[in-house]
Image (tube, rainbow, N blue to C red):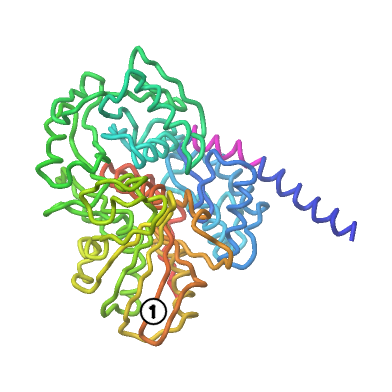
Amino acid sequence: MSQKSDTCLDAWMDREAMAEAMIPLIGRLYRENSVVTSVHGRPLVNRSVIDILKAHRFARQIDDVELPVSETLPILRALTELELGAASVDLARMNTKYQREGNGVPLLDFLRTELADVAGKHGADERTSTDVVLYGFGRIGRLLARILIDHEGGGHGLRLRAIVVRKGAENDLVKRASLLRRDSVHGAFPGTITVDEENNTILANGTLIQVIYSNDPATVDYTSYGINNAIVVDNTGRWRDEAGLAQHLSAKGVSRVLLTAPGKGDLKNIVHGINHQAITDEDKILSAASCTTNAITPVLKVLNDKFGIVNGHVETVHSFTNDQNLIDNFHKGDRRGRSAALNMVITETGAAKAVAKALPELAGKLSGNAIRVPTPDVSMAILNVNLETETTKEELNTFLRETSLNSELHKQIDYIDSPEVVSTDFVGSKRAGIVDGLATISNGKNAILYVWYDNEYGYSCQVIRVLEEMAHVNPPAFPRAEELAVTA
């Protein structure tokens, strides 16, 4: 028994050593070549040894075995020899492709062919820098700031330049910085933050953020701060139609606007992965829809494509929000005046109908309702749908698991089948929604799916993806996988 224990410990220490060796290679590729590395979509930049090993363990969902660090470390070493230009490289998918198609070719030669478009470009990045302004700095605004700072890299792509708020107190700047630094749900900011009260700036991990105080979006002169052609992300929820949001376009230095809430009227509601192809350079104002719409639309799309949806109902079990009262008090909305911390509160949701704005083929087919519950983050959507084609729980889960791994929607849909997961396990999930396979129910043509989603962070990741599309700052992704067949 002692010998077996020693063997296990030795194997673990070997894997730790290899993961430690990966960290400087990952950092070098990121900072010198603008290359972002990942394992099945799990980013490796600025991650710890344990984070890297956990990302490799995730591969069990595909091959029922962990992805060996001994196979990805040589890939990283080879990548550093290719003098790459800006790119996104998934080490797990690249390793799978090499194992299947390498045919004995040396790894370096195989990678040079696979990455021919960026090999030898010596860190060249054809992307232009796009200034981003966060109008409002609440729950979503601060998470967007964290993600943008984390993605800053070499300064290409999206650059957070300013936040705009209404001044709440004399020490407003210090309080804003403190809320960015510490979060009761999402933990401490991963880095350093410095406040300059004289110049109204926050310096976060090298990103200098100008704090602008204004009550009128039309009168801000961003050009006076060196900000030009910026995309303003309005996360206040104060204006949701074109007329209201157009006020931002009257400000100097603003070119486009993105709303982090469902848009009203004819505004395009974009769910990344579903209809982001509809974004054009002529679109000056766009909506990133709601967190619930982003969570359910990808799952509904693949279900409709595979089995056909006749009709259905979406019930959302949603964490409480700032719109509710902590204790009983007057509220203009029905039931929302009752204590959010003590009650389950039945309320309306427009998410089911909003699906049709991104997925027109489901127009008129879905109803929806919501129950607000006393948790601060992570929600669940229960999809009860009637299908055109009969299926089984096993067929549904196999299809959704494969979809989460190998389809174009792998950034939107995740899958889990653990018997012990609860809502807090999904805090910080980058996916729009996570299918809980063990909860799936199937009865012929009727299916009920349970989809978890971090209604704060997961949604914020979707907003960033829309921003990247608007700014055309996505680097080329490798391997350029011919779309892997999604099998039932």
Q: Residue furthest top?
A: 198
Q: Which residue is mark 1?
A: 447
Query: Where is residue 24 drawn, in percent x and y?
Result: 60, 36
Query: Where is residue 85 drawn, in percent x and y?
Result: 44, 39
Q: Quadrant of the C terminus?
A: bottom left
Q: Which residue is found at the position 38% from the left and 61% from the top?
A: 317
Query: Does residue 123 sit above or below 93 in this rendering?
Result: above
Residue 22 part of the magenta-drawn span: yes
Magenta extent: 21-31
The front one of 42 and 418 is 418
The front one of 471 and 216 is 216
The front one of 91 and 360 is 360
Q: Residue furthest right?
A: 2
User: In screen coordinates, is 447 left or right of 352?
Assistant: right
Residue 383 part of the magenta-drawn span: no
Q: Quadrant of the N terminus?
A: bottom right
* Kind of residue at badge 1: Ala
Question: What predominant SS class does the magenta segment belong to?
Answer: helix
- Count of numbered tags: 1
Asked whether the viewer can see residue 268, the reply is yes
Q: Which residue is found at the position 11% from the left and 54% from the top?
A: 265
Label 1, residues with CA under 10 Å away: few <14, some 14-19, many ≥20 = many
Quadrant of residue 362 in the image? bottom left
Query: Where is residue 105 drawn, in percent x and y?
Result: 59, 58
User: In screen coordinates, is 194 left or right of 170?
Assistant: right
User: In screen coordinates, is 332 left or right of 28?
Assistant: left
Query: Does residue 455 sit above or below 77 in this rendering?
Result: below
State the SS at label 1: strand
Q: Which residue is found at the position 28% from the left and 35% from the top?
A: 136
Quadrant of residue 407 in the image? bottom left
Q: Residue furthest left?
A: 243
Query: Where is residue 333 drawn, in percent x and y?
Result: 22, 52
